[in-house]
Structures are given as C-alpha cells and as structure tokens.
C-alpha cells in the first residue's frame, strides 16, 4: 500500500495527464457522434440496432437458460446495487485512511448516474419493442443506465487498484473481474431486449468519460 494522498498525486505526471486528456476527448467525440446518429434516427445506426435486437430477443425467447441467466445478471448488477458496492468500498477506503479516493469514487458514480439520466431525457429514445417481449421496462432507452453505472464503477476500481494495489497479479485479477461485470451487464441489457446495442456502447463511453474527467479534475 502507498501512503495516503500519494496515489492521486502520481497522475500529475505529464505523460499520463496527456493520455487521460486524449482518452476523455476521444470518448466525448465518439459519444457525441453516436448520440447525433441515434437522435437523428440515422439508418447507419438504427438498422443494425433493430436487426441485432430482434436476433437477441429470438435467442432469449427460444432459450430459457439464456433468458434466466440474463435476468439474474440484470438483478444482481442493477445500478442501485452497483452504487451500493461503490459506497461500501468508499467507506472501506476511508477506514484505511484513503478518504480522498473514496470521496472521488462516490463523486464519479453520482455524476455518471446524473449524466446518464440527463442524456436519456435529452435524446428520449423509446426502448425496443417486440411482439412477445422477454422483459418490459419503462423509461427511455439511450443510454443504458445499467451500463453507465457499471462502466463508471469499473473505471473507479481500475484507477484505485492501479494506485493502491502493488501486487501485479492481484491488480490484474481485480481489473479483470470488474471488466467481466461490465460485459455481463452489457450482454443482459441486449439479450433481455431492454436496450439496443448503441445504448450499451453509449453507456461504455459515458462511464469512461466521466471517470477520466474525474481523475483529471480531482
């Protein structure tokens, strides 16, 4: 473990800061472009979205195993649960004298949640509709709130693990675990017909952008 306060000071290195700025810029540009295509109902995005949505919905309809696994994933990794995990981790960090890291993580998760809700209201994209839906949900579709939260939590975990965990094997294990969670959440959103693929991609981009901007600001 490194001394309290040393982890965030390390990101002031010029090369790392430039990389973070470029990462934030790329994520923002891609998110803006994707949002414009979705909001404009451009076939380049909407046609593949609808085709994939029907494909995954048929798969879930015809396979109870896939359907049930996806439903379990959606329940276990819902945004409130993920935010709760983040809050518990923040308390644990505070107990270990890493209060700044915990406060930063909570702030990133809160901003990500608000940003996701704001973008939903701005775009107001209806959710996928099917004749025999596996799952019916209210609210707007773009971006996926589940994925925004999962991506932000993964980003926070990766940043803090990089700063605090010195053992490379353990650090890689933690990073791999949180990335797996993001993939599970992303998959169940599409399989259950709750979101289009572009909603999921937007969740990745928004969660990543908020995390990186959080590092740069903090």
Image (tube, grey):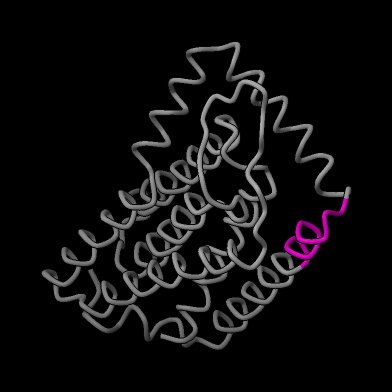
At 52% across and 63% down in the image, what residue appears? 116
Provide residue 65's location: percent of width, then percent of height. Answer: 48, 14
Q: Residue furthest left?
A: 95
Image height of 113 relative to 151, above or below: below
Along the horizontal axis of the image, is 104 left or right of 88? right
At 87% across and 54% down in the image, what residue appears? 42
Please, what is the dominant secondary structure of the magenta stretch?
helix
Instruction: Give 15 or 93, whichever is nearer the viewer.
Output: 93
Q: Is residue 132 magenta?
A: no
Provide residue 199's location: percent of width, then percent of height. Answer: 64, 50
Q: Residue furthest right?
A: 43
Provide residue 77's location: percent of width, then percent of height. Answer: 38, 42
From which residue to which does the magenta span run? 33-42
At 67% across and 53% down in the image, what residue appears? 125
Along the horizontal axis of the image, is 208 left or right of 114? right
Image quadrant holding the C terminus, namely bottom left
At 47% across and 49% down in the image, what residue appears? 146
């Amino acid at each position: 473990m490194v001394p309290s306060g040393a982890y965030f000071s390390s990101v002031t290195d010029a090369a790392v800061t430039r990389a973070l700025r470029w990462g934030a810029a790329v994520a923002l540009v891609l998110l803006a472009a994707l949002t414009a295509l979705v909001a404009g109902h451009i076939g380049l995005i909407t046609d593949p979205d609808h085709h994939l949505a029907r494909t995954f919905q048929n798969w879930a309809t015809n396979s109870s195993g896939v359907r049930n696994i996806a439903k379990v994933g959606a329940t276990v990794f819902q945004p409130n649960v993920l935010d709760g995990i983040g809050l518990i981790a923040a308390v644990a960090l505070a107990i270990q004298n890493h209060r700044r890291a915990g406060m930063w993580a909570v702030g990133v998760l809160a901003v990500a949640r608000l940003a996701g809700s704001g973008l939903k209201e701005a775009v107001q994209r209806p959710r996928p509709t099917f004749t025999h839906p596996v799952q019916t949900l209210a609210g707007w579709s773009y971006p996926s709130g589940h994925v925004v939260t999962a991506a932000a939590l993964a980003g926070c975990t990766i940043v803090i693990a990089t700063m605090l965990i010195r053992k490379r094997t353990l650090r890689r294990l933690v990073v791999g675990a949180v990335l797996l969670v993001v993939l599970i959440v992303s998959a169940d959103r599409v399989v259950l017909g709750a979101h289009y693929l572009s909603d999921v991609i937007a969740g990745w981009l928004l969660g990543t952008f908020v995390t990186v901007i959080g590092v740069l600001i903090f």
